[in-house]
Image: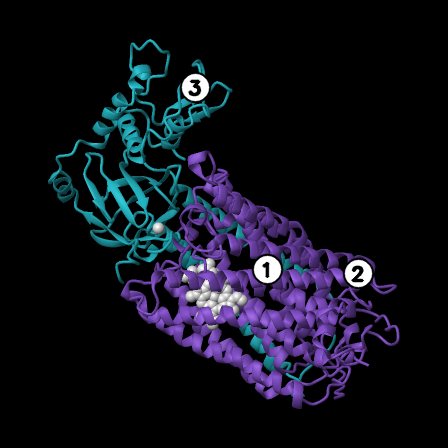
Chain colours: A purple, B cyan
Amino acid sequence: MSYLDEGHTIKSWLTSTDHKRIAILYAISISVFFFVGGAAATLIRLELATPAGDLVSHDTYNRLFTAHGVIMVWLFLIPSIPSVFGNFLLPLMIGAKDLAFPRLNLLSWYLYVAGGVLVLCALAAGGVDTGWTFYTPYSTMFSNGYVVLTLFGVFVTGFSSILTGLNFIVTVHHLRMPGMGWFRLPLFIWAIYATSLILVLATPVLAMTTLLLVAERLWHIGVFDPALGGDPILFQHLFWFYSHPAVYIMVLPAMGVASEIIPCFARQRIFGYRFMAYAILGIASIGFLVWGHHMFVSGQSMAASMVFSLLSFLVAIPSAIKVFNWTATLYKGSLRFEAPMLYALGFVGLFMIGGLTGLFLASLALDVHLTDTYFVVSHFHYIMVGGTVMAYFGALHFWWPKVTGKLVPDLWARIAAVLIFLGFNFTFFPQYLLGVAGMPRRYHQYPPQFQVLHLLSSAGAVVLAIGYLLPLFYLAWSLRYGQRASANPWDARGLEWETSSPPPTHNFTHPPQLPERVYDYDPTSPRAVAQ
Amino acid sequence: MNSTLAEASSIARSTDLLFGAMLLLCGVMAIGICFVLLFFCIRYRAGNRKVDRGVVGRKLGVELTWTLVPLALFIVIFTWAAHDFSELYRPPADALPISVEAKQWMWKLQHRNGKREINELHVPLGQPVKLVMSSQDAIHSFFVPAFRIKQDVVPGRYTTLWFTATQLGEFPLFCSEYCGSSHSQMIGRIVVLAPADFGRWLQAGTSQPSLAQYGYARFRQLGCSGCHAAGSTVHAPALEGLLGRTVHLQDGRTLVADENYIRDSILLPQKDVVAGFAPVMPSFAGQVSEEDIQGLVAWIRSTGGPQGAPR
Ligand code: HEM
Ligand SMILES: [Cu+2]
């Protein structure tokens, strides 16, 4: 009996401690937030089609981009891959029955939803206009939005992150099946493990920062207010100390996903497995030391800027290694291009462009011109949307048969993958050009010379939106009419494919066999297609 | 080219050169990787029968190469960019000081002779200009794309920015740090005039006292002169020629007196007590306005001293 048949009532889902069911709870709630955040993005792009700012008022526009940023960052990007696929796959991939603390896992989900609902309440009540970065003193002294309520929502979801991270770390340490050493872990598990370390170490700083901000706003305690001896730059240090590593919370799991999909569809061992694992650890640890690169023009000291710039170049090295190794994995393989592979290759391309443009921003003298322009907007969308969201969709298509027991209609899935890739570039590439031309970000109106590029970007957003909506339909269709999936429809390696699709409640009916080595693919023997 | 993207300051050229080099380097990398990726995708597609496949083992040499070569390249770029960056904070000693105050949602500028402008800044061609900036409310950012310069303007402290305009004309000035409702309308322009025209413009229609005169008047009204003037009974350091001078402090530190030091000495006098003096100065927080501080700084600047010190 599969985990899906373990009870069909709402209650059986809302009280389940099965990691697989909790993963599905996350998937549903995260999708809701993704579409709310996406609706805000659509309005933003519509508004920016003309320079005059004639669709919505200033204040509405400012609330829209804040809502978009807050929802996408805290309610979609950060939890997306870890909470959905980490939850579903971590025990399966290491041959365990569940996570170390199943009830804590359920509590994490409730905290996440509670935080999300608080944020939505703040929006419904009238919204916030601080930007997702909440810079002081604007957020503490001048904003007239629902800052405290929003921050409280973010604070609560932060606890969800911390608990999830703790749960994953303990699980990886204690519940690996007998004989499974560290270098027999799939790279997805390495990525989830490193992400969990960041979650546990960085999120408390976010919690503290939001509390200080709330206290400052309500009681003027003077930590950030210069009139009381405080310092607004201090807020930026605290904020980015969390929020820069948060970028790696978003992108490391995405790298893990690509490292599972690419070998499977290339029928080739991942190139340089150990380097890939070390690169993950390298990114996670150096990633803690680069937050100051958001502050090169803030007034921080020149010495600090130099150090942060140098470290930012260093963190690019392991990222470059990953791109090279994924490419090299294709060499002498036997490649098939079903939808998951298209998403994974799209991820590699977009991540590469996002990463390379990051080097422009790390270069001090160039950052002075480019920061706080659309160049930055484009850069982080390439990394976070091009990277994380592409990988999330890749994972969704790759593991859909495992999760639901149904195959995805591949033609439709490929069409969506291509639309998303093209629509994405069409939307965001013009924004690099806008940034170079000096268009500042967070502008509700803009000088008319920027209109052509803005219009292109808005047109691209339409294509992108269609690409994002398509999967909603064909995935729902497959739930009802899709072909039944076998245990291992892609002929993939990895323990999660050793059990039935969908898996039974306790994951394995027989203890799985520990494979000889990870990614034991062989391009000379054709894929066994068992549907 | 439109006026936002003109190369209109002395540093614009070197910034663009760096940008071009990065574009070349990253462009070659990106195109190279895309090419290899596509090439592999086509050559090793499952349907292709005439190709040699097989498990690929470890290739340590290859991996070390593509780790160390980027590392070397990155160190070169870092050094280049950091060098250009440090220039941005080394204003020439003769730079023309102009004070800038940002507030929601306008730029207020004041020249040395007291002439004021709003959302418009006239500067002479070919002469270094140094902006001493502070904000009355939120953080703003002074951004002139044609000059390739940008600096946040922060409440509670001075930040500075300097440039030499190299092209006559008008160039947009943006606020690039989100500062609330009308952030996107906090737009101004920089008007670059020939030096003679600038001189004429500066003299036209000012009846106000210069900023330094205003500052000196406040120096007396606020009672600063009671302690700091020569011959006063209270033992306090003389302020003439202070800006840019090295100051030794009570606790053994030394620092170079810049605008922020003067500001802090007025508002937080216990923070940096000068060696040899008792910490008796009261704080003037709440009694002085932003403008008063700007004026006092301008007066001290007008009394000479090394000035132009790096940040
Ligand atoms: C149709 C797709 C999207 C469009 C057209 C779009 C457009 C935009 C625009 C115009 C901004 C405001 C930039 C500014 O003025 O500061 C923005 C900000 C942002 N977007 Fe998107 N976006 C899209 C999808 C996404 C997705 C899927 C995510 C995350 C998964 C995301 C994450 C962000 C973040 C974090 C910000 C920063 C908010 C801020 O600081 O202003 N976006 N986006
Ligand atoms: Cu502003």
Residue A449, horizontal then vertical, whole percent? 28, 65
Q: What residue type is labelled 3?
A: Val
Q: Name the residue under label 3.
A: B274
| Whether marks 2 and 1 lie on the same chain | yes
Residue A286's x, y, as percent?
A: 62, 50
Q: Residue A100 carries which label?
A: 2
Give the class, few, some or many, for how many residues have Cα within 10 Å of label 3's Cα (few <14, many ≥20): many
Q: In this view, does A172 lie above or below A515?
A: above
Of badges 1 and 3, nearer the viewer stands 1
- The residue pinned by badge 1 equals A115
Residues B86 and A477: in front is: A477
B265 or A305, which is in the foreground? B265
Q: Where is residue A338 in the image (x, y as percent from the top left)?
A: 63, 83
Task: Output the chain of dot 1.
Answer: A
Snapshot quadrant of residue A278: bottom right
Query: Exactly how many numbered labels are in the figure?
Result: 3
Q: Residue B183: image x %, image y %?
A: 34, 55
Q: Which chain carries label 3?
A: B
Q: Marks 2/1: CA distance? A: 24 Å
- Name the residue rendered at 35%, 42% in the picture: B135
Mark closer to the chain start, 2 or 1: 2
Quadrant that contains the C terminus of chain B:
top left
Work out whether residue A480 or residue B33 is closer to the camera in this orientation and state it.
A480
- SS assignment at label 2: loop
Q: Do labels 3 and 2 share a chain?
A: no
User: As drawn, is A531 to the left or to the right of A322?
Assistant: right
| Amino acid identity at mark 2 | Ala
The residue carrying pointer 2 sits among few (fewer than 14), some (14 to 19) or many (20 or more) residues within 10 Å by Cα, namely many
Please indicate, yes or no, whether residue B62 appears anywhere in the rendered image: no
Q: Can residue A385 be seen in this view?
A: yes
Looking at the image, is A369 positioned above or below residue A407? above
